[in-house]
Amino acid sequence: MAEEAAASTPPQSSAAPLGSSVIPIVNKLQDIFAQLGSQSTIELPQVAVVGSQSSGKSSVLESLASDICTRRPLVLQLLQTKRKPDGSEEEYGEFLHLPGKRFYDFSEIRREIQAETDREAGGNKGVSDKQIRLKIFSPNVLDITLVDLPGITKVPVGDQPSDIEARIRTMIMSYIKQPSCLILAVTPANSDLANSDALQIAGNADPDGYRTIGVITKLDIMDRGTDARNLLLGKVVPLRLGYVGVVNRSQEDILLNRSIKDALVSEEKFFRSRPVYTSLADRCGVPQLAKKLNQILVQHIKAILPGLKSRISSALVSVAKENASYGEITESKAGQGALLLNILSKYCEAFSSMVEGKNEQMSTSELSAGARIHYIFQSIFVKSLEEVDPCEDLTDDDI
């Protein structure tokens, strides 16, 4: 499973992996902010994966299983761990909604994702914008944080509403419009790249192309006599961060439970057997994709870290001032009750002052508080009553 999540990485060396100093910090902040929900206004760096349902985007990241269609945003944190002294390795996953529980059987992780999706979005293809957060610990991954978003769909199925495409696009845009978000735009090689849904929505969010990485999937099922060389070189739709081509596991591979390691061997053989891709070794294969993502994410985090630190510091100062205005918080229930009563009393006083027009912070350029209430009743409510003819609503039964 960790192989599935990570794709592949080089053997671990004694040196600290790239990003080991900054990515874990961002991951911790993400966990904290996730518990705050919509109260958090600070956007953290991450990689959002977008594509149509048929693009193979979830397979690109090998995020669990092909029979689990992403119907909720799946935040996947890959964390590289060290192998044991005897050379053995421990791989496991943890969900944020199940703190302290480790999943060593990755089939159980698949089932938990499906169950948690059904709990929120229903069991009949419904879609929800509520995140599922999963951490994968393994020596076979590079430190990367990914958000696998629901695939763009054209035709509603199951319990999906008629405007499902617009809803999914709005959900995707809420992630990728943020300057802190890198975009992994996934497009199958057997489709028209110029009309790619992923590149189109990425272009709307990132018109200058500074945050978008292209992924070309399904290279092995292109028509005979064709190849993706020009696509990977950016000659069709240029991207500043370039493209990476990958070969996904086939549906047969998945049904027969063939391992990711075997799939990676097959992918390597595919590229080696085709001379057209020989000079594009740095743009071909899942291992290259993992490496490229890790490097770009680290550079991205380091670039925006100073501004992020400044925003967090400002937020801390603001919260500290607000907390201080409430008074000293004690551990005793009696003290906490007195504090709450004091806060409620102050609120009542402030509300009364506002209604009576005595609040110093009231605007002098528009009606507010009591004056606004009086205006609504006299100029709107009463006028509306005067315009109503009571006889108009009488029916024959009323007479």
Image: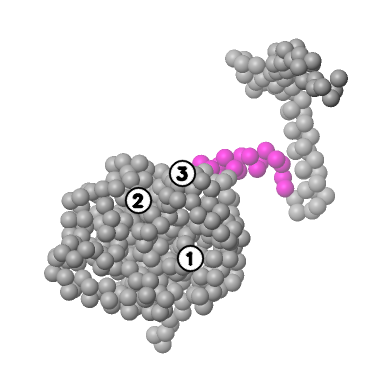
Amino acid beneath label 1: Ile
In terms of secondary structure, where does tag 1 sit?
loop
| Placement of the N terminus among the 4 image quadrants | bottom left
Disc 3 vs disc 1: Cβ atoms closer than 8 Å? no
Disc 2 to disc 1: CB gap under 8 Å: no
Provide residue 366's location: percent of width, then percent of height. 61, 16
Crowding at mark 3 (Cα within 10 Å: few <14, some 14-19, many 20+):
some
Residue furthest bottom in the image: 86
Q: Nearer the viewer, residue 64 or 27?
A: 64
Give the magenta range.
313-329
Q: Earlier in the sequence, mark 2 or mark 1?
A: 1
Tag 1 residue: 68
For mark 3, give the secondary structure: helix
Q: Position of residue 216 (x, y in %)?
A: 28, 59
The x, y position of residue 333, in whole percent, is: 80, 52
Furthest residue in direction right, as rendered: 399
Query: Could you tell which of marks 2 and 3 lies nearer the N-terminus?
Result: 3
Q: Hey, what amino acid is under mark 2?
A: Ala
Q: Quadrant of residue 251?
A: bottom left
In this rendering, is residue 14 above or below 125? below
Q: Residues within 10 Å of mark 2 (few under 14, many from 20)?
A: many
Q: Quadrant of the C terminus?
A: top right
To which residue does mark 2 refer?
Answer: 198
Q: Report the side of 175 relative to 185 (left or right).
A: right
Q: Quadrant of residue 39?
A: top right
**Which residue lies under the disc numbered 3?**
166
Residue 317's spot in the image, x, y percent? 55, 42
Q: Between marks 3 and 1, how big is the CA–CA gap?
A: 22 Å
Residue 368 lies left or right of residue 125; in this view the side is right
